[in-house]
């Protein structure tokens, strides 16, 4: 090794030592490499498989075709399910954030002692199985469930209501309850970080509590709201358990078709193409949503 090479290595070593962020990434590089491999390899495998053609039961033509993507984008049933999935996930996200914000606000601003106890209570639903929570709503909203039985015993209705179950509304209600905790925590963190002196200054300048909320609290809590929205929207688009149990034929989502294609349908290339198409659509929507939210936040600040 010549003198120039040793100087370059010395400068590189000094650069790495003087940069804490670089040292941190180097320390995390094995973990990051493993996570990247575990994420990328399945996606690459699905991407490769999506260009195959099904020729028989678990037999494929690997010569390459775009027919699976053409079918995923043009088939009427898939278009309906894509739109239904996005609408159900969008409504679930809005409902969950709207319901989670008051509780997060209460914990951040009004609970003075034992906040950790409240946080633990908020996470209690995660202590039970997701499937069990879905079944609980099936019991509550069912034909002979708690809602119908209670209304009949009170004399409000004469026969059970049939529109409570096996429709998109039941899916939205169940998903909203299931993902409420995920929305509460990031919103709470954003609210907890707000400097209380800023609120006092707004009050001293004559802002009422209502105006102060919309001019100060809500813009500062926007990062938490954005994080909660993304954390809810992405997984609910791909949920197939809840639509299967409480959605019925009118509440089926695109994930149910994907599950069928990889399961009983045994058409893995079609399932892979639909999966990647759905992922791309969701990714584009999330990027647009995040960009728009940042622009609005920048204007408000």
Image (tube, grey):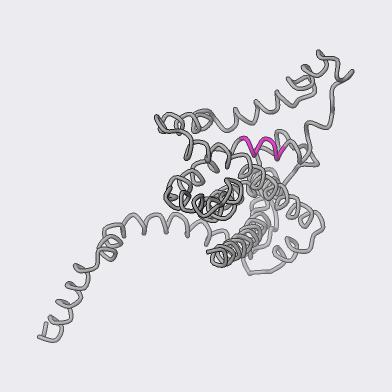
In the image shown, does 130 or 269 lie closer to the viewer?
130
Above or below, 111 against 143 in this view is below
- Is residue 295 rendered to the left or right of residue 257? left
From the viewer's side, name the closer residue of 295 and 242. Answer: 295
Residue lying at 15% horizontally and 83% vertically, measured from the top left = 5
Q: Quadrant of residue 263?
A: top right
Residue 169 drawn above or below residue 198: above
> Can see residue 252?
yes
- Visible in this render: residue 49? no
Q: How many marks?
A: 0
User: What residue is drawn where x is 70% and y is 27%?
Assistant: 138
Q: Is residue 170 above or below residue 237?
A: above
Q: Is residue 90 left or right of residue 130?
A: right
x, y (%) of residue 203?
51, 49
Is residue 286 part of the magenta span, yes or no? no
Residue 112 rendering spot, x and y as whole percentages: 42, 33
Q: Residue furthest right?
A: 158
**Residue located 59% across and 52% down the image:** 214
Task: Quadrant for residue 243, please give it.
Answer: top right
Q: Main secondary structure of the magenta part?
A: helix
Task: Indicate left or right for 167 with 86 as reference.
Answer: right
* Nearer the observer, 289 or 77: 289
Task: Give the residues in magenta.
Answer: 171-177
**Depth check, front residue: 113 or 71:** 113
Which quarter shows the N terminus?
bottom left
Residue 61 located left or right of residue 154:
left
User: What is the x, y in percent for residue 134?
Assistant: 64, 31
State the image coordinates of residue 113 (x, y, percent, origin top left).
40, 30
Farthest residue toward the top? 153
| Residue drawn at the location 71% of the way across and 24% of the way down | 140
Choose top left, top right, bottom left or bottom right for residue 168.
top right
């Amino acid at each position: 090794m010549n003198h120039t090479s040793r100087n370059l290595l010395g400068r590189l070593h000094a650069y790495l030592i003087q940069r804490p962020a670089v040292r941190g990434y180097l320390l995390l590089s094995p973990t990051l490499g493993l996570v990247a491999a575990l994420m990328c390899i399945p996606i690459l495998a699905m991407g490769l498989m999506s260009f195959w053609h099904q020729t028989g039961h678990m037999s494929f033509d690997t010569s390459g075709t775009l027919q699976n993507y053409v079918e995923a984008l043009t088939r009427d049933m898939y278009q309906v399910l894509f739109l239904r999935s996005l609408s159900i996930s969008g409504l679930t996200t809005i409902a969950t954030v709207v319901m989670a914000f008051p509780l997060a606000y209460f914990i951040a601003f009004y609970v003075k002692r034992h906040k950790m106890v409240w946080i633990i209570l908020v996470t209690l639903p995660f202590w039970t199985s997701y499937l069990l929570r879905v079944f609980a709503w099936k019991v509550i909203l069912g034909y002979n469930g708690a809602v119908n039985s209670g209304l009949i015993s009170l004399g409000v209705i004469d026969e059970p209501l049939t529109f409570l179950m096996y429709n998109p509304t039941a899916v939205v209600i169940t998903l909203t309850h299931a993902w409420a905790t995920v929305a509460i925590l990031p919103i709470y963190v954003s609210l907890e970080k707000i400097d209380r002196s800023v609120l006092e200054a707004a009050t001293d300048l004559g802002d009422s509590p209502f105006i102060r909320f919309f001019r100060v609290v809500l813009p500062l809590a926007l990062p938490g709201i954005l994080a909660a929205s993304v954390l809810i929207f992405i997984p609910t688009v791909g949920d197939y358990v809840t639509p299967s149990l409480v959605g019925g034929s009118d509440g089926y989502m695109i994930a149910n078709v994907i599950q069928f294609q990889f399961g009983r349908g045994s058409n893995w290339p079609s399932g892979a193409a639909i999966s990647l198409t759905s992922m791309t659509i969701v990714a584009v929507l999330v990027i647009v949503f995040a960009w728009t939210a940042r622009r609005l936040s920048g204007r408000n600040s």
